[in-house]
Image (tube, helix red, strand yellow):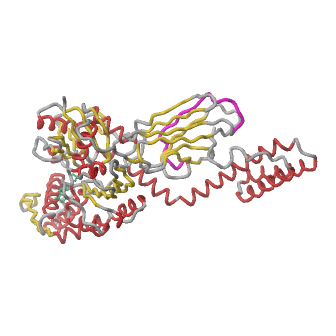
Amino acid sequence: MSRMIGIDLGTTNSCVAFMENGHAVVIPNAEGSRTTPSVVAFTKSGERLVGTAAKRQAVTNASRTFSSVKRDMGSDARFSVDGKQYTPQEISAMILQKLKADAESYIGEPVTDAVITVPAYFSDAQRQATKDAGLIAGLNVLRIINEPTSAALAYGFDKGQPCKVMVYDLGGGTFDVSILDINSDTIEVLATAGNNHLGGDDFDQCIVGWLLERFREEHKLDLSKDPMAMQRLSEAAEKAKIELSASSETMINLPFLAQGPSGPMHLEATLTRVRFNELTAHLVTATKGPVQQALQDAGISASALNRVLLVGGSTRIPAVQDEVRKLTGKEPSRDINPDECVAMGACLQGGVLSGAINSIVLIDVTPLSLGIETLGDVFAKIIDRNTPLPCQHSQVFTTAANFQTSVEINVLQGEREIASANKSLGKFRLNGIRRALRGIPQIEVTFSIDTNGIVHVTAKDLGTNSTQDITISGSGNMSREEIDRAIRDAQRYAAEDRQRKQTQQTRDAAESMLNQARKTRKKLKDEDRSRLDASIAELEDALKDGNEQRIRTASEDIDRILRSVGTYTSAPEGGNDDGAYDA
Ligand code: AMP
Protein backbone atom coordinates (compact mmCIF):
# COMPACT_ATOMS: atom_id res chain seq x y z
CA MET A 1 0.00 0.00 0.00
CA SER A 2 1.32 3.45 -0.86
CA ARG A 3 1.79 6.12 1.79
CA MET A 4 -0.31 9.22 2.31
CA ILE A 5 1.18 12.69 2.79
CA GLY A 6 -0.14 16.04 4.03
CA ILE A 7 1.03 19.06 2.02
CA ASP A 8 1.06 22.72 2.93
CA LEU A 9 1.42 24.26 -0.54
CA GLY A 10 2.43 27.74 0.60
CA THR A 11 2.85 31.04 -1.22
CA THR A 12 6.54 31.31 -0.28
CA ASN A 13 7.36 27.93 1.28
CA SER A 14 5.81 24.49 1.20
CA CYS A 15 6.02 21.69 3.72
CA VAL A 16 5.17 18.00 3.66
CA ALA A 17 4.43 15.53 6.48
CA PHE A 18 3.52 11.87 6.81
CA MET A 19 2.07 9.59 9.50
CA GLU A 20 4.56 7.51 11.44
CA ASN A 21 3.47 5.43 14.43
CA GLY A 22 0.29 7.50 14.77
CA HIS A 23 2.12 10.85 14.69
CA ALA A 24 2.54 13.49 11.99
CA VAL A 25 6.21 13.78 11.06
CA VAL A 26 7.67 16.54 8.87
CA ILE A 27 9.75 15.24 5.97
CA PRO A 28 13.02 17.08 5.25
CA ASN A 29 13.69 17.78 1.58
CA ALA A 30 16.67 16.49 -0.41
CA GLU A 31 18.66 19.57 0.69
CA GLY A 32 17.96 18.79 4.36
CA SER A 33 15.47 21.63 5.04
CA ARG A 34 12.08 21.07 6.60
CA THR A 35 10.39 23.56 4.28
CA THR A 36 10.91 24.06 0.54
CA PRO A 37 10.70 27.47 -1.17
CA SER A 38 7.68 27.50 -3.53
CA VAL A 39 9.88 28.71 -6.37
CA VAL A 40 10.36 27.19 -9.83
CA ALA A 41 13.01 28.32 -12.30
CA PHE A 42 14.12 27.37 -15.78
CA THR A 43 17.82 27.87 -16.37
CA LYS A 44 19.13 29.09 -19.72
CA SER A 45 20.43 25.57 -20.37
CA GLY A 46 16.89 24.23 -20.01
CA GLU A 47 17.26 22.71 -16.54
CA ARG A 48 14.31 23.00 -14.20
CA LEU A 49 15.04 24.07 -10.62
CA VAL A 50 12.58 23.80 -7.74
CA GLY A 51 12.98 25.06 -4.17
CA THR A 52 16.14 26.53 -2.67
CA ALA A 53 18.14 26.22 -5.90
CA ALA A 54 15.48 28.20 -7.76
CA LYS A 55 15.19 30.81 -5.00
CA ARG A 56 18.95 31.35 -4.89
CA GLN A 57 19.08 32.52 -8.50
CA ALA A 58 15.72 34.34 -8.47
CA VAL A 59 17.04 37.89 -8.84
CA THR A 60 19.70 37.11 -11.43
CA ASN A 61 17.34 35.02 -13.56
CA ALA A 62 14.15 36.93 -12.77
CA SER A 63 12.34 36.48 -16.09
CA ARG A 64 12.67 32.68 -15.90
CA THR A 65 11.92 32.27 -12.19
CA PHE A 66 8.39 31.98 -10.82
CA SER A 67 7.45 32.53 -7.21
CA SER A 68 4.23 33.26 -5.29
CA VAL A 69 2.34 31.40 -8.03
CA LYS A 70 -0.27 30.49 -5.42
CA ARG A 71 -1.63 34.02 -5.76
CA ASP A 72 -2.58 33.20 -9.37
CA MET A 73 -4.23 29.83 -8.73
CA GLY A 74 -7.64 29.63 -10.36
CA SER A 75 -6.93 32.58 -12.65
CA ASP A 76 -6.07 32.81 -16.34
CA ALA A 77 -2.47 33.85 -15.59
CA ARG A 78 0.21 32.19 -17.70
CA PHE A 79 3.95 31.92 -17.17
CA SER A 80 5.96 31.88 -20.32
CA VAL A 81 9.43 30.46 -20.88
CA ASP A 82 11.07 29.79 -24.24
CA GLY A 83 7.77 30.16 -26.05
CA LYS A 84 5.96 27.69 -23.80
CA GLN A 85 3.09 28.86 -21.60
CA TYR A 86 2.55 27.29 -18.18
CA THR A 87 -0.62 27.56 -16.10
CA PRO A 88 -0.40 28.26 -12.34
CA GLN A 89 -1.49 24.64 -11.84
CA GLU A 90 1.43 23.34 -13.88
CA ILE A 91 3.99 25.43 -11.99
CA SER A 92 2.44 24.40 -8.67
CA ALA A 93 2.53 20.78 -9.85
CA MET A 94 6.32 21.09 -10.26
CA ILE A 95 6.60 22.07 -6.59
CA LEU A 96 4.27 19.22 -5.59
CA GLN A 97 6.34 16.80 -7.67
CA LYS A 98 9.47 17.74 -5.76
CA LEU A 99 7.67 17.35 -2.41
CA LYS A 100 6.36 13.96 -3.53
CA ALA A 101 9.80 12.82 -4.73
CA ASP A 102 11.50 14.01 -1.52
CA ALA A 103 8.84 12.25 0.54
CA GLU A 104 9.28 9.00 -1.41
CA SER A 105 13.02 9.01 -1.00
CA TYR A 106 12.70 9.77 2.75
CA ILE A 107 10.01 7.16 3.43
CA GLY A 108 11.42 4.67 0.95
CA GLU A 109 7.99 3.86 -0.45
CA PRO A 110 5.82 5.26 -3.26
CA VAL A 111 3.44 8.06 -2.30
CA THR A 112 0.19 8.65 -4.15
CA ASP A 113 -2.51 9.91 -1.75
CA ALA A 114 -2.34 13.44 -0.40
CA VAL A 115 -4.32 16.02 1.53
CA ILE A 116 -3.44 19.54 0.39
CA THR A 117 -4.24 22.70 2.29
CA VAL A 118 -5.51 26.02 0.93
CA PRO A 119 -6.34 29.34 2.61
CA ALA A 120 -9.86 29.33 4.08
CA TYR A 121 -10.87 32.17 1.73
CA PHE A 122 -9.87 30.24 -1.43
CA SER A 123 -12.72 30.24 -3.94
CA ASP A 124 -14.08 27.30 -5.81
CA ALA A 125 -11.80 27.82 -8.83
CA GLN A 126 -8.73 28.22 -6.64
CA ARG A 127 -9.54 24.93 -4.84
CA GLN A 128 -10.17 23.19 -8.16
CA ALA A 129 -6.88 24.51 -9.50
CA THR A 130 -5.05 23.21 -6.41
CA LYS A 131 -6.65 19.81 -6.85
CA ASP A 132 -5.66 19.84 -10.53
CA ALA A 133 -2.07 20.72 -9.60
CA GLY A 134 -2.07 17.62 -7.39
CA LEU A 135 -3.38 15.49 -10.24
CA ILE A 136 -0.74 16.84 -12.63
CA ALA A 137 1.92 15.95 -10.05
CA GLY A 138 0.61 12.37 -9.97
CA LEU A 139 -1.13 12.68 -6.61
CA ASN A 140 -4.54 11.39 -5.68
CA VAL A 141 -5.90 14.37 -3.74
CA LEU A 142 -8.07 12.91 -1.00
CA ARG A 143 -9.22 16.27 0.29
CA ILE A 144 -8.50 19.97 0.07
CA ILE A 145 -8.68 21.45 3.58
CA ASN A 146 -8.41 24.92 5.03
CA GLU A 147 -5.04 25.95 6.44
CA PRO A 148 -6.30 27.29 9.80
CA THR A 149 -8.35 24.14 10.31
CA SER A 150 -5.27 22.12 9.59
CA ALA A 151 -3.22 24.13 12.10
CA ALA A 152 -5.86 23.52 14.75
CA LEU A 153 -5.76 19.78 14.03
CA ALA A 154 -2.00 19.77 14.53
CA TYR A 155 -2.54 21.40 17.90
CA GLY A 156 -4.87 18.52 18.78
CA PHE A 157 -7.96 20.65 19.23
CA ASP A 158 -10.14 17.89 17.86
CA LYS A 159 -10.41 16.18 21.21
CA GLY A 160 -10.64 19.08 23.58
CA GLN A 161 -13.39 21.17 25.11
CA PRO A 162 -15.50 23.39 22.86
CA CYS A 163 -13.55 26.59 22.29
CA LYS A 164 -12.96 29.58 20.04
CA VAL A 165 -9.50 29.84 18.51
CA MET A 166 -7.76 32.53 16.50
CA VAL A 167 -5.19 31.38 13.95
CA TYR A 168 -2.80 34.24 13.16
CA ASP A 169 -0.84 33.21 10.06
CA LEU A 170 1.96 35.49 8.87
CA GLY A 171 4.02 33.71 6.21
CA GLY A 172 6.52 34.91 3.63
CA GLY A 173 4.09 36.77 1.40
CA THR A 174 0.64 36.62 2.92
CA PHE A 175 -1.19 37.32 6.16
CA ASP A 176 -4.34 35.43 7.14
CA VAL A 177 -6.31 35.48 10.32
CA SER A 178 -9.12 33.03 11.00
CA ILE A 179 -11.51 32.49 13.86
CA LEU A 180 -12.38 28.84 14.47
CA ASP A 181 -15.21 27.38 16.48
CA ILE A 182 -14.09 24.01 17.78
CA ASN A 183 -16.56 21.52 19.16
CA SER A 184 -16.23 17.89 20.17
CA ASP A 185 -16.42 16.62 16.59
CA THR A 186 -16.24 19.65 14.33
CA ILE A 187 -13.93 22.52 13.51
CA GLU A 188 -15.73 25.37 11.84
CA VAL A 189 -14.07 28.43 10.33
CA LEU A 190 -16.29 31.27 11.56
CA ALA A 191 -14.50 34.04 9.72
CA THR A 192 -11.34 34.87 7.83
CA ALA A 193 -9.60 38.12 6.91
CA GLY A 194 -6.14 39.05 5.78
CA ASN A 195 -3.82 40.75 3.39
CA ASN A 196 -2.53 38.90 0.35
CA HIS A 197 0.52 41.14 0.08
CA LEU A 198 1.91 41.25 3.58
CA GLY A 199 4.55 38.88 4.87
CA GLY A 200 8.17 38.15 5.71
CA ASP A 201 9.35 39.32 2.28
CA ASP A 202 8.21 42.85 3.18
CA PHE A 203 10.29 42.70 6.37
CA ASP A 204 13.28 41.65 4.27
CA GLN A 205 12.68 44.54 1.87
CA CYS A 206 12.75 47.03 4.77
CA ILE A 207 16.22 45.78 5.66
CA VAL A 208 17.31 45.84 2.01
CA GLY A 209 16.14 49.48 1.77
CA TRP A 210 18.09 50.36 4.89
CA LEU A 211 21.23 48.65 3.57
CA LEU A 212 20.95 50.36 0.16
CA GLU A 213 20.68 53.71 1.91
CA ARG A 214 23.76 53.05 4.03
CA PHE A 215 25.73 51.90 1.02
CA ARG A 216 24.65 54.99 -0.92
CA GLU A 217 25.74 57.26 1.95
CA GLU A 218 29.09 55.55 2.33
CA HIS A 219 30.05 54.86 -1.31
CA LYS A 220 27.80 57.30 -3.23
CA LEU A 221 26.58 54.36 -5.30
CA ASP A 222 23.06 53.09 -5.92
CA LEU A 223 22.97 49.28 -5.97
CA SER A 224 19.24 48.94 -6.62
CA LYS A 225 19.75 48.36 -10.37
CA ASP A 226 22.44 45.71 -9.88
CA PRO A 227 20.65 42.30 -9.86
CA MET A 228 23.61 40.36 -8.47
CA ALA A 229 24.05 42.80 -5.57
CA MET A 230 20.27 42.84 -4.94
CA GLN A 231 20.16 39.03 -4.76
CA ARG A 232 22.95 39.05 -2.15
CA LEU A 233 21.32 41.92 -0.23
CA SER A 234 17.94 40.21 -0.02
CA GLU A 235 19.49 36.92 1.13
CA ALA A 236 21.53 38.77 3.76
CA ALA A 237 18.44 40.71 4.84
CA GLU A 238 16.41 37.54 5.40
CA LYS A 239 19.28 35.98 7.33
CA ALA A 240 19.64 39.09 9.52
CA LYS A 241 15.89 39.17 10.17
CA ILE A 242 15.90 35.52 11.25
CA GLU A 243 18.88 36.12 13.55
CA LEU A 244 17.12 39.09 15.13
CA SER A 245 14.31 36.78 16.26
CA ALA A 246 16.83 35.20 18.62
CA SER A 247 19.37 37.96 19.35
CA SER A 248 19.25 41.69 19.93
CA GLU A 249 21.68 42.58 17.16
CA THR A 250 23.28 41.06 14.09
CA MET A 251 26.20 41.75 11.76
CA ILE A 252 25.65 41.98 8.03
CA ASN A 253 28.83 41.44 6.11
CA LEU A 254 28.88 41.46 2.31
CA PRO A 255 32.40 41.70 0.87
CA PHE A 256 32.94 42.62 -2.79
CA LEU A 257 29.37 43.80 -3.24
CA ALA A 258 30.29 46.19 -6.07
CA GLN A 259 33.22 47.38 -8.10
CA GLY A 260 34.05 51.07 -7.79
CA PRO A 261 36.61 53.29 -9.57
CA SER A 262 39.06 52.72 -6.74
CA GLY A 263 38.51 48.99 -6.32
CA PRO A 264 36.00 46.60 -4.72
CA MET A 265 33.38 47.93 -2.31
CA HIS A 266 32.22 46.02 0.78
CA LEU A 267 29.21 46.39 2.99
CA GLU A 268 29.40 45.98 6.73
CA ALA A 269 26.57 46.92 9.04
CA THR A 270 25.21 46.14 12.47
CA LEU A 271 21.45 45.98 12.71
CA THR A 272 19.87 46.00 16.15
CA ARG A 273 16.48 44.54 16.93
CA VAL A 274 15.35 48.00 18.09
CA ARG A 275 16.22 49.51 14.68
CA PHE A 276 14.66 46.54 12.86
CA ASN A 277 11.47 47.04 14.87
CA GLU A 278 11.41 50.72 13.90
CA LEU A 279 11.92 49.89 10.21
CA THR A 280 9.11 47.32 10.20
CA ALA A 281 6.64 48.79 12.72
CA HIS A 282 4.17 49.71 9.97
CA LEU A 283 4.07 46.07 8.76
CA VAL A 284 3.33 44.75 12.23
CA THR A 285 0.60 47.36 12.72
CA ALA A 286 -0.94 46.41 9.36
CA THR A 287 -2.09 43.10 10.84
CA LYS A 288 -4.39 44.90 13.27
CA GLY A 289 -7.19 45.70 10.77
CA PRO A 290 -7.70 42.10 9.58
CA VAL A 291 -7.63 40.80 13.17
CA GLN A 292 -10.40 43.19 14.13
CA GLN A 293 -12.33 42.42 10.96
CA ALA A 294 -12.21 38.66 11.57
CA LEU A 295 -13.39 39.08 15.17
CA GLN A 296 -16.19 41.34 14.02
CA ASP A 297 -17.26 38.91 11.26
CA ALA A 298 -17.21 36.03 13.74
CA GLY A 299 -19.33 38.14 16.09
CA ILE A 300 -17.03 37.75 19.07
CA SER A 301 -14.66 39.95 21.04
CA ALA A 302 -11.00 39.12 21.62
CA SER A 303 -11.80 38.29 25.24
CA ALA A 304 -14.01 35.40 24.05
CA LEU A 305 -11.02 33.66 22.43
CA ASN A 306 -9.77 30.62 24.31
CA ARG A 307 -6.53 30.22 22.36
CA VAL A 308 -4.46 32.05 19.77
CA LEU A 309 -2.27 29.93 17.46
CA LEU A 310 0.71 31.31 15.59
CA VAL A 311 1.27 29.96 12.08
CA GLY A 312 3.83 31.01 9.45
CA GLY A 313 7.55 31.62 9.81
CA SER A 314 7.15 35.37 10.33
CA THR A 315 5.32 34.86 13.62
CA ARG A 316 8.75 34.09 15.05
CA ILE A 317 9.48 37.83 14.95
CA PRO A 318 9.26 39.03 18.58
CA ALA A 319 7.51 42.30 17.62
CA VAL A 320 4.84 40.29 15.81
CA GLN A 321 4.26 38.18 18.92
CA ASP A 322 4.01 41.35 21.01
CA GLU A 323 1.40 42.71 18.61
CA VAL A 324 -0.64 39.50 18.89
CA ARG A 325 -0.54 39.78 22.70
CA LYS A 326 -1.64 43.40 22.44
CA LEU A 327 -4.48 42.69 20.00
CA THR A 328 -5.88 39.64 21.74
CA GLY A 329 -4.83 40.03 25.37
CA LYS A 330 -3.65 36.40 25.21
CA GLU A 331 -0.33 34.61 25.31
CA PRO A 332 -0.15 32.93 21.87
CA SER A 333 0.54 29.19 21.61
CA ARG A 334 3.81 28.35 19.93
CA ASP A 335 4.27 24.71 20.90
CA ILE A 336 4.46 23.50 17.29
CA ASN A 337 6.77 25.00 14.67
CA PRO A 338 4.69 27.70 12.99
CA ASP A 339 5.91 26.77 9.52
CA GLU A 340 5.19 23.08 9.99
CA CYS A 341 1.84 22.84 11.77
CA VAL A 342 -0.30 23.23 8.63
CA ALA A 343 1.35 20.30 6.84
CA MET A 344 1.15 18.23 10.04
CA GLY A 345 -2.58 18.94 10.35
CA ALA A 346 -3.12 18.00 6.69
CA CYS A 347 -1.40 14.72 7.33
CA LEU A 348 -3.58 14.06 10.41
CA GLN A 349 -6.67 14.80 8.32
CA GLY A 350 -5.40 12.26 5.79
CA GLY A 351 -5.12 9.83 8.68
CA VAL A 352 -8.78 10.47 9.54
CA LEU A 353 -9.85 9.95 5.92
CA SER A 354 -7.91 6.75 5.52
CA GLY A 355 -9.29 5.43 8.79
CA ALA A 356 -5.89 5.41 10.52
CA ILE A 357 -7.24 7.94 13.04
CA ASN A 358 -10.90 7.94 13.99
CA SER A 359 -11.91 11.23 15.42
CA ILE A 360 -13.33 14.23 13.76
CA VAL A 361 -15.50 15.54 10.98
CA LEU A 362 -14.36 18.82 9.54
CA ILE A 363 -16.55 21.71 8.69
CA ASP A 364 -15.29 24.53 6.55
CA VAL A 365 -17.16 27.60 5.39
CA THR A 366 -17.91 29.36 2.13
CA PRO A 367 -15.97 32.64 1.91
CA LEU A 368 -18.60 34.73 0.07
CA SER A 369 -22.36 34.61 -0.41
CA LEU A 370 -23.74 32.79 -3.45
CA GLY A 371 -26.98 33.34 -5.29
CA ILE A 372 -28.53 34.32 -8.59
CA GLU A 373 -29.55 37.41 -10.51
CA THR A 374 -33.24 38.27 -10.42
CA LEU A 375 -35.38 40.88 -12.13
CA GLY A 376 -34.06 44.43 -11.99
CA ASP A 377 -30.40 43.55 -11.33
CA VAL A 378 -31.20 42.31 -7.84
CA PHE A 379 -28.94 39.70 -6.21
CA ALA A 380 -30.95 36.95 -4.51
CA LYS A 381 -28.68 35.30 -1.95
CA ILE A 382 -29.17 31.55 -1.59
CA ILE A 383 -26.16 30.64 0.53
CA ASP A 384 -24.83 33.19 2.99
CA ARG A 385 -21.16 33.96 3.45
CA ASN A 386 -19.47 31.81 6.13
CA THR A 387 -22.04 28.98 5.84
CA PRO A 388 -20.44 25.69 6.98
CA LEU A 389 -19.64 23.14 4.26
CA PRO A 390 -20.95 20.88 2.92
CA CYS A 391 -24.26 22.66 2.46
CA GLN A 392 -27.32 22.72 0.26
CA HIS A 393 -29.97 25.42 0.04
CA SER A 394 -32.94 25.87 -2.29
CA GLN A 395 -35.20 28.77 -3.08
CA VAL A 396 -38.23 28.96 -5.37
CA PHE A 397 -38.37 31.68 -8.03
CA THR A 398 -40.79 32.52 -10.78
CA THR A 399 -40.89 34.11 -14.23
CA ALA A 400 -40.83 37.81 -15.02
CA ALA A 401 -42.82 37.80 -18.27
CA ASN A 402 -46.03 36.16 -19.44
CA PHE A 403 -45.60 32.85 -21.31
CA GLN A 404 -41.89 32.79 -20.71
CA THR A 405 -40.63 29.25 -21.40
CA SER A 406 -36.98 29.64 -20.46
CA VAL A 407 -34.92 31.50 -17.91
CA GLU A 408 -31.25 32.27 -17.69
CA ILE A 409 -29.66 31.48 -14.36
CA ASN A 410 -26.72 33.76 -13.67
CA VAL A 411 -24.77 32.30 -10.73
CA LEU A 412 -23.23 35.05 -8.65
CA GLN A 413 -20.77 35.33 -5.80
CA GLY A 414 -20.42 38.46 -3.67
CA GLU A 415 -21.89 40.64 -0.97
CA ARG A 416 -23.53 43.45 -2.95
CA GLU A 417 -27.31 43.66 -3.25
CA ILE A 418 -26.95 44.71 -6.90
CA ALA A 419 -26.42 41.65 -9.09
CA SER A 420 -24.11 43.31 -11.61
CA ALA A 421 -21.79 44.50 -8.82
CA ASN A 422 -21.08 40.87 -7.87
CA LYS A 423 -18.96 38.33 -9.69
CA SER A 424 -20.63 35.99 -12.19
CA LEU A 425 -19.36 32.42 -11.78
CA GLY A 426 -21.29 31.05 -14.73
CA LYS A 427 -24.60 31.08 -16.55
CA PHE A 428 -26.95 28.42 -17.79
CA ARG A 429 -30.42 28.29 -19.29
CA LEU A 430 -33.42 26.32 -18.09
CA ASN A 431 -35.77 25.54 -20.99
CA GLY A 432 -39.08 23.71 -21.09
CA ILE A 433 -40.97 25.84 -18.58
CA ARG A 434 -44.73 25.42 -18.97
CA ARG A 435 -46.35 28.44 -20.69
CA ALA A 436 -48.12 30.48 -18.05
CA LEU A 437 -48.70 34.03 -16.87
CA ARG A 438 -45.77 35.67 -15.16
CA GLY A 439 -45.47 34.73 -11.53
CA ILE A 440 -47.13 31.31 -11.97
CA PRO A 441 -44.26 28.90 -12.82
CA GLN A 442 -42.29 27.66 -9.83
CA ILE A 443 -38.59 27.27 -10.47
CA GLU A 444 -36.57 25.74 -7.69
CA VAL A 445 -32.92 26.74 -7.66
CA THR A 446 -30.64 24.59 -5.51
CA PHE A 447 -27.06 25.42 -4.57
CA SER A 448 -24.87 22.74 -3.08
CA ILE A 449 -21.25 23.02 -2.05
CA ASP A 450 -19.22 19.91 -1.25
CA THR A 451 -16.51 19.49 1.38
CA ASN A 452 -13.86 20.63 -1.10
CA GLY A 453 -15.83 23.85 -1.59
CA ILE A 454 -16.94 22.97 -5.13
CA VAL A 455 -20.24 24.56 -6.16
CA HIS A 456 -23.08 22.83 -8.00
CA VAL A 457 -26.26 24.67 -9.05
CA THR A 458 -29.50 23.06 -10.26
CA ALA A 459 -32.66 24.73 -11.57
CA LYS A 460 -35.88 22.75 -11.80
CA ASP A 461 -39.31 23.75 -13.08
CA LEU A 462 -41.55 22.16 -10.46
CA GLY A 463 -44.41 22.09 -13.03
CA THR A 464 -42.67 20.06 -15.73
CA ASN A 465 -39.72 18.64 -13.76
CA SER A 466 -37.46 20.04 -16.47
CA THR A 467 -33.99 20.31 -14.91
CA GLN A 468 -30.71 21.94 -15.81
CA ASP A 469 -27.51 22.22 -13.82
CA ILE A 470 -23.96 23.53 -13.73
CA THR A 471 -20.81 22.69 -11.79
CA ILE A 472 -18.72 25.75 -11.32
CA SER A 473 -15.16 24.96 -12.23
CA GLY A 474 -12.22 26.28 -14.17
CA SER A 475 -11.07 29.86 -14.24
CA GLY A 476 -12.82 33.14 -13.77
CA ASN A 477 -13.34 32.79 -10.06
CA MET A 478 -12.41 35.28 -7.38
CA SER A 479 -8.98 35.99 -6.06
CA ARG A 480 -8.27 37.01 -2.50
CA GLU A 481 -8.05 40.66 -3.59
CA GLU A 482 -11.42 40.39 -5.27
CA ILE A 483 -12.94 38.78 -2.19
CA ASP A 484 -11.51 41.48 0.07
CA ARG A 485 -12.67 44.15 -2.35
CA ALA A 486 -16.14 42.58 -2.55
CA ILE A 487 -16.48 42.67 1.23
CA ARG A 488 -15.17 46.24 1.47
CA ASP A 489 -17.42 47.40 -1.40
CA ALA A 490 -20.40 45.71 0.17
CA GLN A 491 -19.86 47.71 3.35
CA ARG A 492 -19.19 50.95 1.48
CA TYR A 493 -22.16 50.64 -0.88
CA ALA A 494 -24.62 49.02 1.52
CA ALA A 495 -26.89 52.09 1.81
CA GLU A 496 -26.76 52.82 -1.94
CA ASP A 497 -27.56 49.18 -2.79
CA ARG A 498 -30.47 49.10 -0.35
CA GLN A 499 -31.88 52.24 -1.97
CA ARG A 500 -31.52 50.76 -5.46
CA LYS A 501 -33.13 47.53 -4.36
CA GLN A 502 -35.99 49.40 -2.73
CA THR A 503 -36.53 51.47 -5.90
CA GLN A 504 -36.61 48.28 -7.95
CA GLN A 505 -39.06 46.68 -5.56
CA THR A 506 -41.33 49.74 -5.77
CA ARG A 507 -41.22 49.49 -9.57
CA ASP A 508 -41.91 45.73 -9.54
CA ALA A 509 -44.88 46.21 -7.22
CA ALA A 510 -46.14 49.08 -9.41
CA GLU A 511 -45.89 46.93 -12.56
CA SER A 512 -47.89 44.20 -10.86
CA MET A 513 -50.44 46.73 -9.72
CA LEU A 514 -50.75 48.01 -13.30
CA ASN A 515 -51.31 44.47 -14.61
CA GLN A 516 -53.99 43.89 -12.01
CA ALA A 517 -55.65 47.24 -12.82
CA ARG A 518 -55.60 46.61 -16.59
CA LYS A 519 -57.22 43.21 -16.10
CA THR A 520 -59.87 44.62 -13.74
CA ARG A 521 -60.90 47.78 -15.59
CA LYS A 522 -63.13 45.91 -18.09
CA LYS A 523 -65.34 44.67 -15.27
CA LEU A 524 -65.95 48.15 -13.80
CA LYS A 525 -68.78 50.66 -14.14
CA ASP A 526 -67.98 53.58 -16.49
CA GLU A 527 -67.44 56.06 -13.69
CA ASP A 528 -65.05 53.77 -11.77
CA ARG A 529 -63.29 52.79 -14.97
CA SER A 530 -62.50 56.37 -15.96
CA ARG A 531 -61.20 57.06 -12.45
CA LEU A 532 -59.02 53.97 -12.69
CA ASP A 533 -57.86 54.85 -16.23
CA ALA A 534 -56.65 58.24 -15.02
CA SER A 535 -54.66 56.58 -12.25
CA ILE A 536 -53.29 53.97 -14.69
CA ALA A 537 -52.12 56.77 -17.00
CA GLU A 538 -50.53 58.57 -14.07
CA LEU A 539 -48.69 55.41 -12.93
CA GLU A 540 -47.50 54.65 -16.47
CA ASP A 541 -46.17 58.17 -16.70
CA ALA A 542 -44.56 57.94 -13.25
CA LEU A 543 -42.81 54.70 -14.25
CA LYS A 544 -41.41 56.41 -17.34
CA ASP A 545 -40.34 59.38 -15.28
CA GLY A 546 -38.71 57.09 -12.67
CA ASN A 547 -39.57 59.25 -9.63
CA GLU A 548 -39.96 56.74 -6.81
CA GLN A 549 -42.28 58.87 -4.70
CA ARG A 550 -44.55 59.55 -7.66
CA ILE A 551 -44.65 55.81 -8.52
CA ARG A 552 -45.55 54.99 -4.93
CA THR A 553 -48.33 57.63 -4.79
CA ALA A 554 -49.82 56.53 -8.13
CA SER A 555 -49.70 52.85 -7.01
CA GLU A 556 -51.44 53.73 -3.78
CA ASP A 557 -54.16 55.56 -5.76
CA ILE A 558 -54.81 52.46 -7.88
CA ASP A 559 -54.74 50.26 -4.79
CA ARG A 560 -57.34 52.52 -3.15
CA ILE A 561 -59.62 52.47 -6.23
CA LEU A 562 -59.37 48.69 -6.60
CA ARG A 563 -60.18 48.17 -2.94
CA SER A 564 -63.10 50.64 -3.07
CA VAL A 565 -64.71 48.89 -6.04
CA GLY A 566 -64.29 45.56 -4.29
CA THR A 567 -62.64 43.68 -7.14
CA TYR A 568 -59.25 43.39 -5.58
CA THR A 569 -58.66 39.70 -5.39
CA SER A 570 -55.14 39.01 -4.29
CA ALA A 571 -51.80 40.51 -3.52
CA PRO A 572 -49.95 41.69 -6.61
CA GLU A 573 -48.21 38.85 -8.38
CA GLY A 574 -44.45 38.86 -8.83
CA GLY A 575 -44.45 41.57 -6.25
CA ASN A 576 -41.67 42.78 -4.14
CA ASP A 577 -40.05 39.51 -3.19
CA ASP A 578 -37.10 38.60 -5.30
CA GLY A 579 -38.87 35.75 -7.01
CA ALA A 580 -38.88 37.03 -10.57
CA TYR A 581 -36.35 36.37 -13.28
CA ASP A 582 -35.24 38.68 -15.93
CA ALA A 583 -36.21 36.83 -19.09
P1 AMP B 1 6.28 30.46 5.75
O1 AMP B 1 5.68 30.95 4.47
O2 AMP B 1 5.31 30.18 6.80
O3 AMP B 1 7.26 29.35 5.54
O4 AMP B 1 7.14 31.69 6.28
C1 AMP B 1 8.27 32.09 5.63
C2 AMP B 1 8.70 33.42 6.14
O5 AMP B 1 9.04 33.30 7.52
C3 AMP B 1 9.91 33.92 5.42
O6 AMP B 1 9.76 35.30 5.13
C4 AMP B 1 11.01 33.69 6.43
O7 AMP B 1 12.06 34.62 6.28
C5 AMP B 1 10.28 33.92 7.72
N1 AMP B 1 10.96 33.31 8.86
C6 AMP B 1 11.32 32.02 9.03
N2 AMP B 1 11.93 31.85 10.21
C7 AMP B 1 11.96 33.07 10.80
C8 AMP B 1 12.49 33.57 12.03
N3 AMP B 1 13.10 32.76 12.90
N4 AMP B 1 12.33 34.88 12.31
C9 AMP B 1 11.73 35.71 11.45
N5 AMP B 1 11.21 35.30 10.27
C10 AMP B 1 11.34 34.00 9.96
Ligand 1: quadrant of the figure: bottom left
Picture quarter with the C terminus = top right
**Residue at 40% of width from left, 62% of height from top?**
300
**Residue at 23% of width from left, 57% of height from top?**
200
Q: Is residue 66 visible?
A: no
Q: Quadrant of residue 405?
A: top right
Instruction: Judge whether residue 97 is colored magenta.
Output: no
Q: Quadrant of residue 373?
A: top right
Left or right, residue 394 beside residue 362: right
**Residue at 7% of width from left, 62% of height from top?**
262
Instruction: Judge whether residue 433 is colored magenta.
Output: yes
Image coordinates of residue 508 in percent, x first then y, are 69, 48
Q: Of residues 272 and 498, which is closer to you in this image?
A: 498
Image coordinates of residue 427 in percent, x first then y, are 52, 36
Relative to residue 358, is residue 421 depicted above or below? Answer: below
Q: Is residue 335 visible?
A: yes
Left or right, residue 376 beside residue 32: right
Q: Of residues 548 and 437, which is closer to you in this image?
A: 437
Picture quarter with the N terminus = top left
Q: Total number of numbered labels?
A: 0
Q: Which residues are magenta?
A: 420-438
Relative to residue 94, is residue 296 depicted above or below? Answer: below
Image coordinates of residue 368 in percent, x first then y, are 45, 49
Q: Of residues 162 and 4, which is closer to you in this image?
A: 162
Image coordinates of residue 117 in percent, x first then y, are 29, 44
